[in-house]
Image: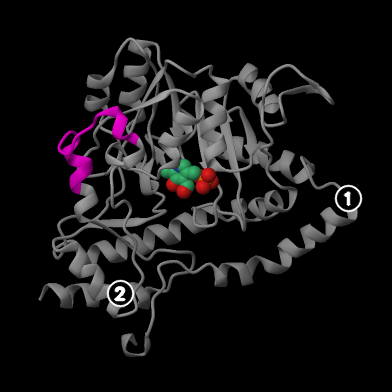
Amino acid sequence: MSDVIDKIPYLDLTKEFSELESEWFELIRETGARGSFILGPNVKAFEKEVANYVGSKYAVSVANGTDALMLSLRGLGIGPGDEVITTPYTFFATSESIDMVGATPVFADILPDSFVIDPESVRQKITKKTKAIMPVHLFGYPANMEELKKIADEHNLKIIEDCAQAFGASNSKHRVGSQGDTGCFSFYPTKVLGCYGDGGIITTSDKELVDHLHKLRNHGAVKPFVHDEIGTNSRLDEVQAALLRIKLKRINQAINHRSQVAVNYSEQLQDVLTAVPMAPENGIHAYNLYTVRAKNRDALRQHLTDSNVGTSLCYPQPLHLQPVYSELGYQAGDLPVAEAACENALSLPVYPDMPKQHVDHACKLIKDFYK
Ligand SMILES: Cc1ncc(COP(=O)(O)O)c(C=O)c1O
């Protein structure tokens, strides 16, 4: 079978689209016939469905995951002079959102086995200016919310969960997005729950914050044409909400498929690679990405590229060493676990309906490389 595979894309959403197309187009037609394109019935229903699924009381949809983080910070009153502790091993939007509200990101190191923020390192970074912790449930693996909540309670800090990559992930029965002051999700197409454009949502159980977020996402308007603060335009489109409602109905099935792909990879690669990802004890890894640690990572990646297998480097450079943060004064060696991950982590293909033969073929190529 593997003989006939000439290409394995890093990500392929086309089969999923063809399966959802007719149901989604029907909902788009209904939306058009109704003539209600912004904050319409699909957006409102989707917000309730997400809150239900995640286990929070409320959800407020926004235009993308970056806005979900930025508006959470604004809604929680975090701004200039404040510090927010986060991970350097994540997509740039995480720390960017902190800068967007005028606060300062402070980077803590990560755990070597799971790539998520190390609660002990968080403790060491707390100062008088610290106002919040922003853990990232990276690649679909939930950060240790129990420990982080203990730290937050001891120091009176807010927690803004970056759940962009982890819809449906859970730790000790709690889904991500239900334990912090807010949970911030992205519906960028590559995410576990992705739309066909941009989208995001904030989950919370704080009603006062919900009222504030409704205002902030709509130009700070208390009622039409009356503005009592500066907000922004950050709303989820009705047609994307319609698609997301269809996909949410199948989300457990989608996550199960990703888990099967991951188990299949791990069984074949655990003795070949330095480390393969594992689900947390008593929890669910949503496997938005399947990221391994590999010796000679760059040569392995080249070998896979030459064999038409797509891969990605998530992430090649830690945020504390990004040029934009040079003024913060971090040096190479400050956060060694994150820096090492940037040297040896490699993300392999995983996507909806990825066939087992593709996983087997990629594994065979990896085993050949290390022979
Ligand atoms: C960890 C993380 N945080 C935040 C974001 C930002 O989400 P969006 O692209 O929807 O703004 C992303 C998206 O890639 C992400 O991976």
Q: Secondary structure at mark 2?
A: helix
In the picture provided, is 216 more to the left or to the right than 222? left
Which is more toward the observer, 27 or 318? Answer: 318
Query: Residue at horizontal 63%, vertical 72%?
Result: 18
Quadrant that contains the N terminus: bottom left
Characterize the local packing of mark 1: few (<14), some (14-19) or many (20 or more) Cα atoms within 10 angstroms.
few
Characterize the local packing of mark 2: few (<14), some (14-19) or many (20 or more) Cα atoms within 10 angstroms.
some
Is residue 165 something that shows in the picture? no
Q: Which amino acid type is shown beneath numbered disc 2?
A: Thr
Which is more toward the observer, 138 or 276? Answer: 138
Mark sitting on residue 45: none
Which is more toward the observer, 157 or 284? Answer: 157
Magenta-highlighted residues: 325-340
Whole-percent x, y for residue 12 in the image: 49, 69
List the residue tagged with mark 2.
305
Whole-percent x, y for residue 63 in the image: 63, 42
List the residue tagged with mark 1.
35
Which is more toward the observer, 127 or 157? Answer: 127
Is 334 part of what is drawn in magenta? yes
Query: Residue at horizontal 60%, vertical 27%?
Result: 57
Q: Which amino acid type is shown beneath numbered disc 1?
A: Gly
In the picture provided, is 169 more to the left or to the right than 215? left
Whole-percent x, y for residue 29 in the image: 83, 61
Would you identify the image quadrant in which residue 147 lies?
top left
Query: Residue at horizontal 53%, vertical 67%?
Result: 13
Query: Which mark is nearer the camera, 1 or 2?
Result: 2
Would you identify the image quadrant in which residue 174 lies?
top left
Would you identify the image quadrant in which residue 336 lies?
top left
Whole-percent x, y for residue 206 in the image: 59, 20
